[in-house]
Image: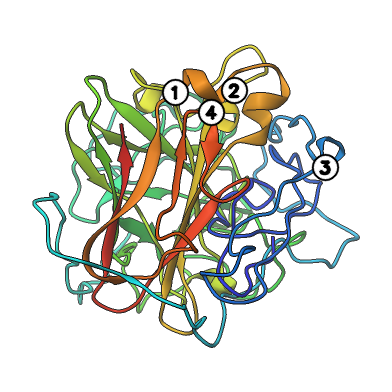
Amino acid sequence: MKLSAALTALTCSVCSAASIGLNVNAGMGDPLAIVVKLPSSNPHSSDYAANPASSAEVAAPSPPPSSSAYAAPSSSSSEPHEEPAPSSAPAPHSSSAATPSSSSYSQAPAPSSDTGDIPDGQGNDFTVPAGAVRFPWNYNNADKVVPITPQSKNGGWAMSPDQQCMPNSWCPYACESGYYSAQWDPTALLYNGAGSMNGGLYADGNGKLTKPDPSKPFCSPGMFNAAIKNTLGQSVSACQTVYPGNEAMIIPSVASAGGSVDLNVVPHTYWLGTSSQFYVNLAGSTGDQCIWGNADKPVGNWAPFIFGGGQGADGITYISVQYNPLYTSVGFKTTDAYNVKIQCESGQCNFPTGGECKCEKGVCSVDNGCTVGLPDGAKASFVIY
């Protein structure tokens, strides 16, 4: 994906790229092989959002690799999935100033000074297949690490349920809503190909886990300036992709009925300047629907919406919403889904021309999705209604 003049409009060709006007390469089992035009000017220009992708540019996904060894795939392509966010802020024609609301926002916590040692399993009873490496945390741990499907073969690691953390491989983990994994392979310098799956901890030939950057905690606080506000009578799950990792949308953030949940919007210092991407399921969904779906079941990569968020090098956070092209490509109707709008909660939020960013009754306020810029001090919600 290419994260440029404003972030990206999302796809899962770099699952976890996400934000506003993406350009994505097909390959590596991309759930969304969408090519969208990057915004070329400011958030008030007509193309400050992903331009529609033609039907030929939307490909059905292939499932992530299911081999037991979680090793980075080789690739002949040097084209990155996404690029760092912009180095200068787009100059909006106008902005929407908001007065603080009662939205239940969490305050961004100070980064932890305790980098922590790798625990030994903390007494968990998670699945550990023969030859696999045990997940080192239990539920509700101080490191804010969250186990993913711990009773499946992945045993808690942020990997697909049929994958295992094996010796001589990288093993990614997930963090609580609002936090991101601060550990990855420091030698991984390509968005695509070798190294792009090397997130988390490294297991050596004896299965001993090592922390690639001992100076950083396992989970660091994200920007804490974007959340989901769910006004519906049922819960809604947002499924973040694992990147660097296998790009599966398996990290859940669940907004309860009438409740809110912080999204993990990463800072510009995140791996190679990439951003976060979320596939947002239908009403009534839970974390159990954060899976790699299929064409007859609109969950995970076939969910109706894609949200994105990340901070640009200019210091502005860019967040976006769009309908998922895969959802409509197989006959699901966007009019059957709920509506979403980005609402400024505090500070100065930069909206596209027209002063709004929403996808309502099957139509987005900007073709194929829209983007909002959040300068320092601004906070916004993805309001589901």
Residues under labels 2 and 4: Cα distance?
8 Å
| SS at mark 2 in the image | loop
**Identity of the residue drawn at 59% across and 22% down:** 293
Residue 57 is labelled as 3
**Identity of the residue drawn at 58% across and 19% down:** 333
Residue type (three-letter) at the residue carrying disc 1: Gln
The total of numbered circles placed on residues is: 4
Residue type (three-letter) at the residue carrying disc 2: Gly
| SS at mark 1 in the image | helix
Residue 289 is labelled as 1
- Placement of the N terminus among the 4 image quadrants: bottom right
Image position, residue 198 (x, y; %): 61, 59
Q: On the picture, is 379 further left or further right than 52?
A: left
Asked if the residue at tag 4 contacts the one at tag 2, i.e. Cβ–Cβ closer than 8 Å, the answer is yes
Residue 258 is labelled as none
| Residue ID for mark 4 | 303
Asked if the residue at tag 3 contacts the one at tag 2, i.e. Cβ–Cβ closer than 8 Å, the answer is no
Going from the N terminus, do you reach mark 3 or mark 1 first?
3
Asked if the residue at tag 2 contacts the one at tag 1, i.e. Cβ–Cβ closer than 8 Å, the answer is yes
